[in-house]
Amino acid sequence: MKTSEIMAKLQAKYGHEPEYLQAVQEVLESIEEVYDQHPEFEKAKIVERLVEPDRMISFRVTWTDDKGEVQNNTGYRVQFNNAIGPYKGGLRFHPSVNPSILKFLGFEQIFKNSLTTLPMGGAKGGSDFNPKGKSDGEIMRFCQAFMLELYKVVGPDMDVPAGDIGVGAREVGYLNGMYKKLTHLHNGVMTGKGLPFGGSLVRPEATGFGAVYFVQHMLQQHQKGDMAGKKVAVSGFGNVAWGACTKATQLGAKVVAISGPDGVIYNPEGMTQEKLDYLLELRASNNDVVAPFAEKFPDAKFIPGKKSWSVPCDIAMPCAFQNEMSREDAEMLIKNGTWMCAEVSNMGCQPGAIAAFQEARIIFAPGKAVNAGGVSCSGLEMTQNAMHINWAAKEVDEKLHMIMSSIHEACVKYGKEPDGYINYVKGANIAGFMKVAQAMLAQGAI
Ligand code: 2IT
């Protein structure tokens, strides 16, 4: 395989989709060497098939706002690859949503889901709907209108959506309710459901908790001790940031930064239970600002317009948005003494940031490994639904621990470089890819 040739073709065809091209480029560069050791992959055109979604559905979503005005948005589902299991991946409601962003997310989801050890293919979906400032009634009517189209292409053995940015337990509840109304089926078509109707314990915490479990494995691998006393800078203040802050704090780490689109909260004393609870309140207020945190907790300071990466820390954990960390941000972290970055957001680091970390031999792991706990717990929710049972929190958490440990092991196995540096990007991409490629090969050229 010549990555440059494949990228040139994709560039010509999809030059207007920068996020998608960025995600593909990273994976192809990582797997090129291994790919070339398997002429059967080349012969079956595995890569050419992998980079193109199986199908991509787009639809109009028409709903009525509280003023009685008719509103229109665009909805999408990108079913990328189902070689190892039903399509699986979240829905994002955010004004930035477009085909490029959903294709990058769906593409990454293939490898992430493969890493989880569970049988799930890759997909993503969402809408350019902006939940900011919307009432509960508007959110409900939008979700119902969205499912009115989506239900035609999803099913528990076909495609199982979940949440992502802008889609949490409330939205999943409304989406699931409408699916049930339309199909008469209570079959676990969504994950991230509420506990009374088929949800799994630990699912809300799973992405952030799983990320910290992964960090623990990286610490152990590099003989850096445990989480106690480590200074952690987190970005974002949503569900994922909350989970990461909660687990890191439980394990004795000091979360010294969180952030929002309006700026960073410098939090030198670390988190308390009260502060963690307030994060949830802040998020529920739907205003997308973090500044009120510093008004409520005077030991914390709000610095407008700055990112979390301006705060000195041992471990950086981007938990907000794709491309949220630039090379300059990474260089500032390195200068301030950061020695580990666990990317929790999907593609949170720009290629230049990853390069800066790797050149400086900073321990860096990519989102598709670090944040895989979320979709893993979704996979466990699917299992419980299929068995018509509920597992205790301890059972789910133990399985989550096992999965994060096996993802870390796979990254080390495929990512160890001759000088001993563990290239987690390479490791995650190769490990995720191999299983999918073998599954595609065995099931014929389709
Ligand atoms: O990016 C992700 O892995 C998610 N948003 C969760 C997907 C899922 O199906 O639980």
Image: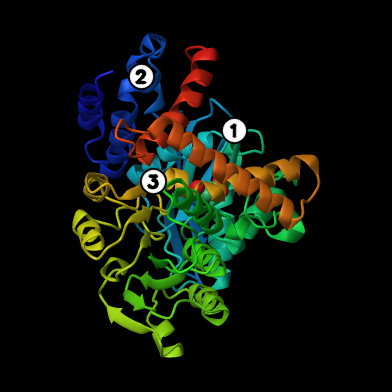
From the image, state whether disc 2 or disc 1 is nearer to you: 2
Residue at numbered disc 3: 366
Quarter holding residue 119: top right
Residue type (three-letter) at the residue carrying disc 3: Pro
Q: Amino acid at mark 2?
A: Tyr
Q: Nearer the viewer, mark 1 or mark 3?
A: 3
Kindly tell me whether residue 149 is visible in this rendering: no
Whether residue 21 is visible here, answered yes or no, is yes
Residue appearing at x 27%, y 63% in the figure: 337
Which residue has dot 1 on it?
Answer: 86
Quadrant of the rendered image containing residue 1: top left
Q: Earlier in the sequence, mark 2 or mark 1?
A: 2
Q: Could you say where residue 128 lies in the image, as x and y percent from the top left?
A: 40, 55
Left or right, 232 with respect to 387, comes to left
Q: Badge 2 is on which residue?
A: 35
Residue 19 horizontal/vertical position (percent):
30, 44
